[in-house]
Structure formats: structure tokens, C-alpha cells
Amino acid sequence: PNVTLIQHPLIQHKLTLMRREETSTAKFRQLLREISMLLAYEITRDLPLRKQLIKTPLGPMEAPILASEKKMVIVSIMRAGQGILDGILELIPSARVGHIGLYRDPRTFIPIEYYFRLPDDIEEREVLVVDPMIATGNTAVAAIQRLKQTNPLSVKFLCLIASPEGIDHFHSYYPEVPLYTAAIDDHLDEHGYIIPGLGDAGDRLFG
Ligand code: HSX
């Protein structure tokens, strides 16, 4: 399957701290920001470069810079995606930002859209969708479905923890969309929570 498990030791360590029940909101927020920077570093490994003629104080040089003409777009699935977005923006401050508001009906687990806003020229931009959790996978599928209507150049999805069920569900709809995650947990419970997971990411991030 089209899944990359990002297992840098610092990421694993920070994720463990985030999972702990006793970790405070402030600490959780800080860890999510740090871990998101590390994930972004890993995901952007293959960004194409081009050469540009520059002048250092001591002379000219053909130096590498990012090749894409158009800045990439980070799309945050509200509200927990905001925590990942903040971290990535520290690393890629010029990225453009989109927002998708989706909440999961607690009974049916069906995502309901309440907000959708993307930057201009989305057809010419690469998109990275971020949300800490893929539980049933319904939210991720709904987000990609909605995004694809706007025809971006490419789409990737980044989360922190995914369930095996969620990954299967996601890729049964969108096998071509690369999924990056820091962990694949054991299973989903009957309330659609990832076990062992870290609880409700939005609640842990915002209180
Ligand atoms: C949580 O539920 C996460 O941040 C996601 O937005 C969503 C994942 O649930 P699911 O749709 O994969 O079941 O609030």
C-alpha cells in the first residue's frame, strides 16, 4: 500500500510523550509542533531543486533553490490539523494554507463539512493535507474528495497516528494518494477511537 511510516527516533520519542495521559495541553501542543517540523522535513526530502545564479560576498555561484514556481499548499483539517499546520509553517513559512472544517457525527461517524477555503491557483499547486488522526478514515476520504473537485497538481496526506482500518478505507477510495504517518496503531474501538492512540487530538490540543 501507498503508506510511508516515518520512524525517526526523535519522532517516535515525541509521539510517546504525546500519548501519555499525564501530558499537559501546553506540552502536547509543543510536542505536536516539534513533531510536525520533523515530519515535514522527512516528507519534503524529494522536493525538486533547480540551480540559480547568486552572488555570495566573495563571488558568483550556481546554488540550489526549490524548483516549484508555485508555493505548496498545506490544507489543515480543522480543528486538530491546526497543530500540525503550525509546526510545518515554522519550517516552510512561505507555504500557502487552506482549511477544511469537518466534524464527525458521533453516532454515524459520517463527516460533515462546515468550512472550506483554499488559496488561488490551486490547479498549479501541490497540496499536503494534515490531520493528526486517521481513525475510521471517513474524514480523510471526505477531505480528499472535496479537494479533488478543485483539481490540484498533486495531493499527499500526513497524519500522526492511523488505524489499520482507516488506512484500508482511505486507500480503497484513493490508492494513488500517498499517506505518511508516524505510527499505525492496533485497532479502532466501537466509538471509532484509535486504540491505544492518544485520545481525542482536538481535545488534547485545545482543551
Ligand atoms: C479527529 O477525528 C481527527 O482529528 C480527525 O479529524 C477525525 C478522524 O476520524 P475518522 O473520520 O478517521 O474516523 O477529530
Image (spheres, rainbow, N blue to C red):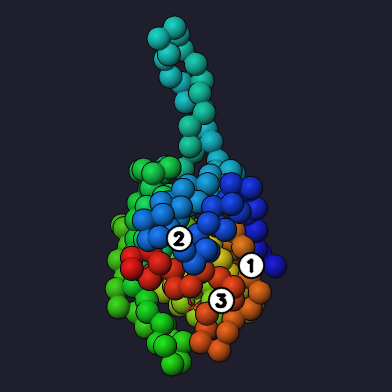
The amino acid marked with disc number 2 is Thr
| Mark 1 lies within 8 Å of ligand 1 (Cβ measured) | no
- Quote the CA–CA distance across marks 2 and 3: 18 Å
Count the marks.
3
Classify 10 Å Cα crowding around label 3: few (below 14), some (14-19), many (20 and above).
many
The residue depicted at 48 percent of the width and 73 percent of the height is: 199
Gap between marks 1 and 3 measured at Cα:
10 Å
- Identify the residue at the far top of this view: 58
Residue 187 can be seen, yes or no: yes
> Which one is earlier in the sequence, the residue at label 2 or at label 3?
2
Towards the viewer: 97 or 164: 164
Q: Which of the two labelled residues, at mark 2 and mark 1, occupies the earlier sequence position?
A: 2
Residue 23's disc number: 2
The residue identified by callout 3 is 194
Amino acid residing under circle 3: Ile
Instruction: Indicate the quadrant containing the N terminus: top left, top right, bottom left or bottom right.
Output: bottom right
> Which of the two discs, 1 and 3, labels the residue nearer the N terminus?
1
* Type of the residue with mark 1: Ile
Q: Helix, strand, or loop for circle 2? A: loop
Residue neighbourhood size for the residue with mark 1, other residues' Cα within 10 Å, grouped as few (<14), some (14–19), many (≥20): some
Q: Disc number at residue 184?
A: 1
Q: Quadrant of residue 174?
A: bottom right
